[in-house]
Amino acid sequence: MQEKYVEQQDGGYWIRGTRVSLDSIVHAFKRGAAPETIRRSFPLLSLEEIYGAITFYLQHESEINAFLQRSEAEFDAQAEVRQQLKDSQPELYERIAHARQENEPTR
């Protein structure tokens, strides 16, 4: 019945009805965080939803772990492409960094 807590959409897994990714819960759980601790990081979620998400992960552990590995590999590949672009067009990235600094709100 944990399927009611997790949905798959847009190429990822999400806590149903929220913008919280299952990845976020799983990474915290794998670091040893208790569900109550995870809830402090995601106050939008109920403890029941967090337990449901963890149960879903444990029931589909190999599938979710494979998904997480693919996601990390894609992120690493994108980081490499970004770095190559930055190295090939340093002037553009310098202008972008300058524009970001100018548009940063003052504190």
Image (tube, rainbow, N blue to C red):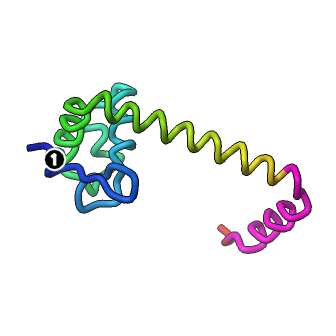
Q: In this orientation, which residue lies closer to the viewer: 28 or 104?
A: 28
The residue drawn where x is 26% and y is 35% is 57
Q: Give the total number of marks visible in the rendering.
A: 1
Q: Please, what is the three-letter code of the amino acid marked with disc 1?
A: Glu
Give the percent coordinates (x, y) of residue 87. Answer: 86, 49
Q: Quadrant of the C terminus?
A: bottom right
Q: Quadrant of the N terminus?
A: top left
Give the percent coordinates (x, y) of residue 11. Answer: 40, 53
Q: Is residue 96 magenta?
A: yes
Q: Main secondary structure of the magenta part?
A: helix
Give the percent coordinates (x, y) of residue 103. Answer: 72, 74
3 on left or right of 86: left
Q: In this orientation, which residue lies closer to the viewer: 70 or 94?
A: 70
Q: Quadrant of residue 93?
A: bottom right
The residue drawn where x is 13% and y is 43% is 2
Element assignment for label 1: helix
Q: Residues within 10 Å of mark 1 (few under 14, many from 20)?
A: few
The residue drawn where x is 27% and y is 57% is 44
Q: Residue furthest left?
A: 1
Write down the residue under mark 1: 3
Q: Quadrant of residue 47?
A: top left
Give the percent coordinates (x, y) of residue 97. Answer: 80, 63
Tell me the magenta residue range.
87-104
Q: Residue furthest right?
A: 91
Q: Quadrant of residue 73?
A: top right
20 on left or right of 48: right
Vertical relation: 99 (above or below) 12: below
The residue drawn where x is 58% and y is 44% is 75
Q: Is residue 83 magenta?
A: no
89 on left or right of 10: right
